Image: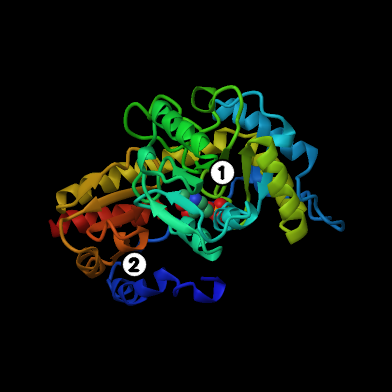
Amino acid sequence: MGVADLADYPWDAVAPLAARAAEHPGGLVDLSIGSPVDATPAVVTAALAAATDAHGYPQTVGTPLLREAIVDWYARRRGAPGLTPAQVLPTIGSKELVAMLPLLLGLGPGDVVVHPRAAYPTYEVGARLVGATPLASEDPSEWPERTRLVWINSPGNPDGRVWSAPQLRVAVERARELGAVLAGDECYAELGWDAPWDASPIPSVLDPAVAGPRLSGVLSVYSLSKQSNLAGYRAAFVAGDQDVIARLLTARKHLGLMVPAPVQQAMIAALGDDRHVEVQRERYRARRDALRPALTNAGFRIEHSEAGLYLWATRGEDAWQSLAWLAELGILAGPGHFYGPFHSEHVRFSLTASDERVAAAARRLTEAS
Ligand SMILES: Cc1ncc(COP(=O)(O)O)c(C=O)c1O
């Protein structure tokens, strides 16, 4: 399997339902793709605007100020103090890193890449791209000897599941036993809703309580797309084991994978300002509070979703049936089929629609129940 063998992009299959939903007299409410709808914060746009003279090539490794900003941010927001600038690396959004990590680590046929059972599809794409074998499993005791990379996604997309520090620790220990790299994809970590995650930080794989004093074999992957409304900037980073980061850096230099200089400046501003993240979090909280009871009243059972950007729900029927029913209400969501073979009766609702659109969805769901 190689690039030429990748399947059609799954979201294309939703287009007929989008067309049907758009015919609703009150207009479409699009809760399908998790693309932010709120404005990029002024503190970030100003930093970008001040950095438009970018005549030279940017550094693949990131500017010293950006690396410091990432280090400070991990200490301040993610319970991971003591990183050094040699342990962090900016990426062009996270998706490219997720897709290419098996390639950048030199994996190939015979190697196993573990990912969650309900999963962001790019973990599997990355494994297949290099001919490695993807394995959907959250149980460390099931991970085979040939495992070379383990993806943990906490809070999860699509299911909003959070891994506690002790659960992460077991996963890290097993990955180390296997000699595998464990990568925690953590981009929804600021969006904790249900207890205890409304009050305590969602653990990072780099937390000393998880990875111990040394970070051997452990990486945290983080994106500013969601928490800072920066999806269009392509602004993300990876941090952790210094040797693994050094290998990634070398490969990325050869491949020309560098974050544009103005975006690096914008990232420094975003990482230094916690206030806009709080504001955004409260927006998502309000949307979740509006949507959740409306879905429950309409017969959906919400599963997990204790954190993150989505509500993961089922009405006990095939997801395409639920989506057809929702399309009649002018609502578009994502079918569980897109997130692996185990969730054909689940639907993912993204909280990335305006307050007005979310209120319209809640109203329509309530009227239809
Ligand atoms: C779990 C997860 N990882 C990574 C990404 C990629 O984010 P980006 O490429 O915008 O940084 C997403 C985006 O939806 C995601 O849900």
Sequence order check: which comes first, mark 1 or mark 2? 2
Q: Quadrant of the C terminus?
A: bottom left
> In this picture, is 42 found above or below 253?
above
The three-letter code of the residue at mark 1 reads: Val
Mark 1 or mark 2, whichever is nearer to me: 1
Residue visible at 48% across and 45% down in the picture: 150
The residue that mark 1 highlights is: 221
> In this picture, is 130 found above or below 264?
below
Mark 1 within 8 Å of ligand 1, using the beta carbon: yes
The residue that mark 2 highlights is: 28
- Quadrant in which residue 289 is drawn: top left
| Picture disc at residue 58 | none
In this rendered view, identify the residue nearer to me: 305 or 38: 305
Q: Is the image coloured rainbow, by chain, by secondary structure, or in one colour?
A: rainbow
Mark 2 within 8 Å of ligand 1, using the beta carbon: no
How dense is the environment of label 2, judged by Cα within 10 Å: few (below 14), some, or many (20 and up)?
many
The three-letter code of the residue at mark 2 reads: Leu
In the orientation shown, which residue stands out farthest toward the right? 56
Q: Position of residue 365 (x, y in %)?
A: 20, 56
In this rendered view, identify the residue nearer to me: 344 or 324: 344
Q: Position of residue 14 (x, y in %)?
A: 35, 71
Disc 1 from disc 2: Cα separation? 33 Å
Q: Is residue 179 left or right of residue 243?
A: left
> In this picture, is 293 found above or below 323?
above
Quick check: can you spot residue 106? yes
Mark 1 element type: strand
> In this picture, is 5 found above or below 358?
below
Q: Position of residue 295 (x, y in %)?
A: 22, 51
How dense is the environment of label 1, judged by Cα within 10 Å: few (below 14), some, or many (20 and up)?
many
Residue visible at 18% across and 52% down in the picture: 300
